Image (cartoon, rainbow, N blue to C red):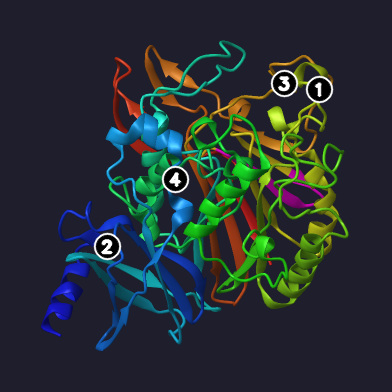
Amino acid sequence: MKKKWILCGLLSSFAASATVDNSQAFRVQPYLQNPANDAMTIMWLSNDNEPGELTVWKNNTTKEYISAPTEVKELSYFPTEIEKYRDQLPNINAPYIHNVRLLNLDSGTKYQYSVTQNGTVFTSTFTTPSKEDNVRFIVYSDSETEPESTGKTRRWSEPFGDFNRQYIVDQTVGYQQNLKVIAERNPNFIAIAGDLVESGNEQRDWDEFWRHNAGELGNVASQAPLLPALGNHENYPGPDGGKKEYVEEFSAQAIARYQAYFDVPDNGSKRAVFKDRYYRVDYGPITYISIDTSDGKKDKSAQDTNWRLTGINAPDFNPGSEQYQWLEKQLADAQKQSQFTFVQFHHIPYSVGPHGFPTGSGGFENGQDNQSGVPVRILTPLFKKYDVKAVFAGHDEMYEHSVVDGINFYDIGIGGDGLRGPYFGKDGKYDVKLDNPHQVFLAHLDSPEVWKGKQLVSGGKHYGHLEVNVTKNSAGDWTAEISPVYVFPLMDKSGNITGWERRVYDDVVKLKR
């Protein structure tokens, strides 16, 4: 017992820490999943099958749990990964996953916890939601992690200028600084609207994701549950994960990796392959719904979001489908039960980016895209009917805000990968007669860069996220404020980066119940 209280004292100074080098104990450090008013899941991955010890306490009450590790062969390295990168892989064996569901917790309560794995102790905290508490959450998309992100910059098109200009730091630094700002804001949860990794069937890309979120580069997921959505890249095998194209066998393996890492609420589907591809979380006063727009049916039709992905067991999202019927039922219930309803998925329906072109195989020059988000517009009437206030998506890797029938649609694909400019419309790369008439803000145009010589002073497209604050005033009225945050690189007069600063685009939205 004495040791437990020593750990408790440590927690007052450190939000999350490991007492010794954990490289031989944790493959992935402890992280949170599936939050509820009276429950929370704590997961971690180890290199061997030794049970872990979880201790959870508040005040003078302590509970202990012993985990039951399960080998996760779905997270094995692909043969080509081992062949090409063996010297870079610390352990080529399949890891063991630990999943502990904590039940009968008190709502609106902060708990401290420690996980001991092979002598290594990791400590952190979590807070359960409450119907009456304010909520702060973060949402972004398109982190698309891969080891190759280090040293690789992304196109940063200059407004009305150089389309191929490169961003000033690589993707690893960009994502790391974005997550640092997120962690400093102490969100209740973090939602990711798809494309977490570059290639869903490359284990190295998942390793990189967890290095940032529950590993050596950061551990924000140890305090804020992650709520993911499937993107096209979660379905993508990748050259080292099987193929350079979407192939049913390897895409299924990619999805199995995604499913192994996340514990989300059961959607009640009788089809096992659909069970955790869409879900609902009630977090205090709000409902947050995540759906899967990977592959509309029928294939290669105007209803299909990915003409390159065929034959895969992805749920359709179009009217009449199982997922559509589930979604309508959840929206109707949430309208009665919650103060605000938010929805996330990957394919942005309204955009001037490359995936804002209508669906087809004619190419951008002809105003068509074979991975278009336009088919998802079919859901807009449903969102309007049940008073959805905001929809979060990505895919086009830009910050763009559109308003359709009073609904705020956000492309927040600026997590850590691309920083695109428009592909059509004003300053678009392609000269086609298309535009997004619903657009109210586009960072590329509406946050102009201000330079003093080599020093960027303000503005521009940068890595970032949305911060949503849901609060109740003294009169009992609820509001939701949505702030588009970008992580600005501070420079000296020579253009060298000296630090980073949290800034907010001039596009803050306040919603009333």
Residue occupying image coordinates x 49% and y 61%: 136
- Secondary structure of residue under mark 3: loop
Amino acid identity at mark 3: Lys
**CA distance for labels 2 and 1:** 50 Å
Q: Residues within 10 Å of mark 2 (few under 14, many from 20)?
A: some
Q: Nearer the viewer, residue 59 or 196?
A: 196
Q: Dot 1 corresponds to which residue? A: 367
Q: CA distance from mark 2 to mark 3?
A: 46 Å
Residue 487 visible here: no
* Amino acid at circle 4: Trp
Residue linked to disc 2: 15
Q: Is residue 439 left or right of residue 152?
A: right
Which residue corresponds to mark 4?
A: 206
Residue at position x 68%, y 57% in the image: 291
Q: Earlier in the sequence, mark 2 or mark 1?
A: 2
Residue at 42% x, 31% y: name it: 171
Disc 1 on helix, strand or loop? Answer: loop
Counting from the top left corner in percent of width and height, residue 466 is at 54, 48
Out of 389 and 206, give the one closest to the viewer.
206
